[in-house]
Structure formats: structure tokens, C-alpha cells
Amino acid sequence: MRITLIISIISHLLFSQVLLDINSIPSGSTVRLNGASIGETPILAFKVTPGNYTLHISSGEYAPVTHELFVQDVKRVKIKFVLNPLYKVKFRSKDQGLTFELNDEHRWVDNRIKLILESGKHTLRVYENGHLFDEQIIQVNRNMEFVYSRQKPQQNEILIEENNID
Amino acid sequence: MLIINKKILFSFLFILTLLINGCGYMLAPKYDQPIYTFKRPYVSVRQTYGEIHIITPVQLVNASPDYFDLQVIKTSDNSPIISGIQYMVGEPIEVYLPQNSLSLEVNGNTLILTPIGRNYSPIVFKFAGIRYGEIVLPHTVINKRPAIVSGLVSKRFDGEPLAHFPVAIIDSLGNKFSEYTNMYGEYEIKMPNEYFYYNNLKIVSGEGSPFHVSQNNIDFKGSFSTVSDILVGPSKQFMEEGNFYIVQNDLTHYRKEPFNGSETQFLLSMNELVAVSRVAGNRLLGQVEVFYETHKSVNITGWVNAKDVIWIGDINLYLSGYGDEIQ
């Protein structure tokens, strides 16, 4: 009975292998599976057993991705990532004494600052003397410069300019 | 000197303007970490299931079941994995199952292949499953005792055996088992076991030969082997008539009178012999020999159109070797 159980477990481990293909844009991204590096994309026919895995994909100028993957007892799993690029963004404020905050957590008070931002939408909040007086969504899709200013302070309108710096 | 100083001053101011406007970020701080959107990137996951392909090679020897019935069950509890699959004879016996549908244990699965027909037993295979891929089960031969018809083919008029003479057995569906006699005029035709039970078999001899094609019924008489000797060609008495013509086409009218429109007694087949006694224009009066038992015959007089027959004379292939004449 015990031998049968052992054989069953061993055969399950030996034969219940699933082929895992990992591809990404950009190719050449580093892949870590449950913390262990398994190479760079494209990865073909990497053998795994069914179960839960954590995949971490990273590439130089792209936002890294962590993905929870449940591998079923199938023949092959193909997974493809399209990583979001990181852009160099210059941010300048025409007004003094403001505090800026991106995405609820990144704050600065400098009038000029260089940022690395993931492509996509970011939430910019502007504080003056600790009080929020402006909130905007900025869209990052290239290397660019943002210039922030209050164009008509009496009407509380805020203008942000986008300049292409490529 | 003053001009040069102005040029230097302008250059200095130009560079200063550039530094202030274009390179104003040279001294700007850099935020210490990339800022992410936490937007989910595009991720596509495709899980592909495999399939299990079971191949059951079967060879039929003297067997001809109506069809095969296949089922696969789990050995442990006899629960069906797949059942009621039917295969025609000659069709490859293979089945596709979804991945992981089989037990991976040794002999954990049972495939039962049942030939449907008389006197067949199911063929049972026990095997270990796989997650996906191909399983080729052992080659199986279904061998049954054949139904055999054998005999001797000889010329009726002198009893001489006919070598390399075509003999065939045809069932009601037109299935044909053909053979040629050996150098001693002997033949043996083996058929699937089921043919023993058929009662509509005919033995046909002479197809494609210069002889008139003849047909007889086959009766196994309770034995898997039966002997059916075949006599072909005209009798010795008929050969003495001489002046033979041979019919060139099937469905040739054999009339009572020479004129057009007279009653047709029966239709002659290709290669039948007519012993002609009189020629009247393009009509020939003659006799044909009709057998109502193997050795019993009657000669029937009638008329044929000259264009339907060809003269072969008195000395003909029935007297000489058959093999020489058909060259």
C-alpha cells in the first residue's frame, strides 16, 4: 500500500509536467518563478507541475510585473506580457511654495524635478500650505516635460503644459 | 577691441540664455525611484489541454465481423470513460479522449473491443493511462477458421484440367473472392469464416477466359470446407457437331426462325458456342448446348445473326491447350 502510494506520488511528480512558455514585449526580460531566475524571454517549454506560481518579469526601462499564475493540469501554458515602458519626465512649476504628490504616495516640493514615470495615467495633487487645491490626471506616453502653473488664480484654474522633450 | 568685447559679451549672454532655458534641469534633483501607475499590464494566458489518442491495431484473418464496438472503462469501478463507439471493418480503430481522463495506475483502464458477428469474443486490453499523448495497444489478430471452397476445373469434353483458369466466389452484395487454378487445374478459395453461414454464394468460372462463363450455387453442407469441381466448355458429343461459331457479345438473340421479329428462345452469352449447320444470307442455323445438370445437357436449335458470331472452325481452343490459345 505504501509502495503504491510512493509510486503514485513519484509518477505524479514525474509525469504531471506542464510545459510553460513565457514571452514578453520587450523580449529579453528577466523572468523569476517563485523567486528563482529561470532565464530571459522568450522561454519555451519550461517544465512545471500544476499549482500556483508567482511570476516576476522585469526589463530595464519597463515597469516590472508580478503575476500570480495558477497552472492547471494541462499540456501547455502560454503566457505573454506586454510591459509598460518607463519614460523620463521633467516636471517644472512656475509657482513657488507648492507641494506635489503623484499617485497618493510620491511627494516633492522642488520647482524642477526629474522623474521616471510608467506610461499611463497618473494622479497629480497639488498642495499649498498643506491644503489640497488642485488634482489632475496626467497622461504619460513619451519622454516629456510638464510645466505647472496657475493661469487664473482668481478663478482657481490650474493649467499644466505638456512639452515634448524627445 | 571694442568690437571683440561685444562679440564675447553676446556669446556669453547666448550661452547663459541656453543654460537658463534649455539646461535648467541640470541642477534639478531626480526623484529617487520610478513612479508606477499600478495599472495592470496586458497579460494573456492560454492553457492548452492535450488529448489522449488510443490506437488499437487489429488484423482480421478469415474474419469479417459486421462492425466493432468499443468502450473504455476504469478498471477500478467499471465506470465508463467512453462507450458505444462503432467502427466499420477496415476503419482504423482509434479513439480520442480528453487529457487526464484515464487512470494513471497500472492496468487502471480497460478497453473492450467487441467484434459484432457470429462466434466472436470481446478483446480486452488493460493498460495504464497517460495524461495526454498516444497509446498504441498491442497488435491483435482475429483469426477464425476460414470457409474454404476447393475443387478441380477441367474441360468437359475430355476431362483435361485447366491451368491458370479464373474462378471466383461472389456473395449477394457483390463481394468477390478470386483465384486461379494451379498447373493441375486445382483451386482453393478461402473466405472469412462468416461466409460459411451465407446461403447465397455463387461460384463463377471462366470470367475473362475464352470459355463461356458459368455460375453455380455453393452449399457448405455443414462443413467449413466444400468441394466444387467445375466442368467448362462443351461436351464431347457437342464437339462432334463441328463448324463452330463463338458468340461475341452478351444478350445475343437466339431465335426460332431466321427472319427479323421471330421469337427469341433465349439470349446467348459471350463465348458460347454455336455449332452451325446452315447459312442463309446473314442468318446462321445452329445448335447450342444447354446444361441443366453438370453432365446432362440438351441441344437446342435456333438462328443467330452472322454479325453476332465469329467462326472458329472445327479445330479450336477447346481441343488444344487453353494457356497457349489465350496468348
Image: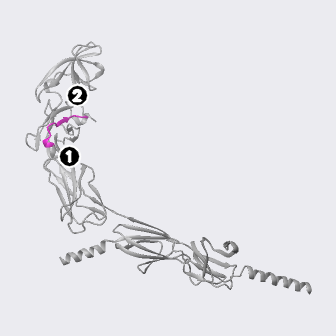
Task: Confirm whether residue B326 shows in the render.
Answer: yes
x%, y% of residue B18? 76, 80
- Looking at the figure, which quarter contains the N terminus of chain B? bottom right
> Which amino acid does the dot numbered 1 rest on?
Asp
What is the spatial separation of the Cα atoms under label 2 and label 1, in whole angstroms? 47 Å
Outermost residue toward the left in this view: B222
- What residue is pinned by disc 1? B66
In magenta, the rendered stretch is B195-208
Which residue is disc 2 drawn over? B316
Residue B55 pos. (x, y %)? 27, 58
Out of B156 and B36, give the one closest to the viewer. B36
Task: Give the number of the mark in front: 2 or 1.
Answer: 1
Q: As rendered, which of B106 and B246 lies closer to the eye?
A: B106
Nearest the camera: A22 or B308?
A22
Q: Is mark 2 on a helix, strand or loop?
A: loop
Mark 2 or mark 1, earlier in chain: 1
Among the 4 quarters of the image, the one containing residue B203 = top left
Across and down, in percent, residue A165 comes to 67, 74
Q: Give, as a three-letter code, the residue at label 2.
A: Asn
Q: Badge 2 sits on which subunit?
A: B
Percent coordinates x, y for residue B260 in the rendering: 28, 13
Instruction: Please check whether the numbered discs 2 and 1 fall on a single chain.
Output: yes
Q: Is mark 1 on a helix, strand or loop?
A: loop
Quadrant hosting residue B219: top left
